[in-house]
Image: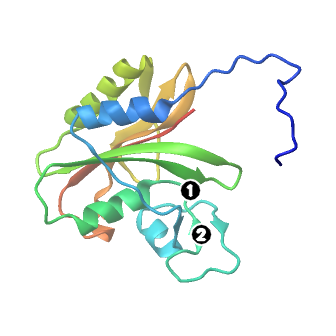
Amino acid sequence: YNNFEPTLPGFYSEGKMVDSYKEVDSIMRGMGFLEIKTFVLTDKTNLMKSGYDGGVVEVLNPACEEFTIVRPSLMANVLETFRMNKTKGLPQKIYEIGYVHDREKLKKSFIFAVMGENTSFADARGHLQALAKEMGWKTELRHDNIFWGEPGQAGAVYLDKKKIGYFGKVRKSVVDNFHIEFSVFVCELELF
């Protein structure tokens, strides 16, 4: 290695670094959210408790029962975090930026969630609107069915006519699966 002579490449390329993580991180912290970091691997039981019924990528030779699949969504991890912290003060506001795999590709996902006794749809939507404004996004909410969403209080988030994620209140049956007694609102978006 010491004998290599340094040379400049024979082409020009002006790179542009897009670091949406730092921007989103700063905005969410500014709104009082705490960041969590959870494992990319999870188990089917936890995922099924969140209401997910789609396909998953399975680990062929898992080291333990808790890490048998690659998570297709951050949803179960957030609900599990709320379950473990439900005795802490309310409201609780958390977010995570992490990788998920939907059987087609690995992608970066972002989720924020609010749990509280008196948290309303308008309160939670205000966080999404503030994030969108700070990021310069023109988002739109449309009614849509999502596996964890309360009918009539959950839907899809669109950016420039493209669906980028989901937002809304988590079904009572799903929060009951995690032994959570409070309302939970979640927004999960694909980061680009």
Q: How many marks?
A: 2
Q: Amino acid at mark 2?
A: Ile
Left or right of 117, for residue 66 = right
Instruction: Tell me, yes or no, if residue 105 can be seen here.
Output: yes
Relative image position of residue 127 (x, y in whole percent): 27, 32
Residue 62 vs 24, above or below: the answer is below
Relative image position of residue 138 (x, y in whole percent): 44, 17
Left or right of 52, for residue 37 = left
Label 1 belongs to which residue? 72
Q: What residue sits 76% from the left and 18% below the top?
A: 13
Relative image position of residue 155 (x, y in whole percent): 42, 37
**Quarter the C terminus occupies:** top right
Pick the residue in front: 79 or 134.
134
Label 2 belongs to which residue? 69
Q: Amino acid at mark 1?
A: Pro
- Quarter location, residue 67: bottom right
Badge 2: few (under 14), some or many (20 or more) residues near its Cα, within 10 Å?
many
Left or right of 67, for residue 90 = left
Q: What residue sits 41% from the left and 68% below the top?
A: 49
Residue that protrudes farthest toward the front in the picture: 3
Q: What residue sits 16% from the left and 43% below the top?
A: 119
Pick the residue in front: 187 or 16.
16
Relative image position of residue 101 (x, y in whole percent): 62, 54
Q: Secondary structure at mark 1?
A: loop
Pick the residue in front: 128 or 163.
128
Residue 169 vs 177, above or below: the answer is above
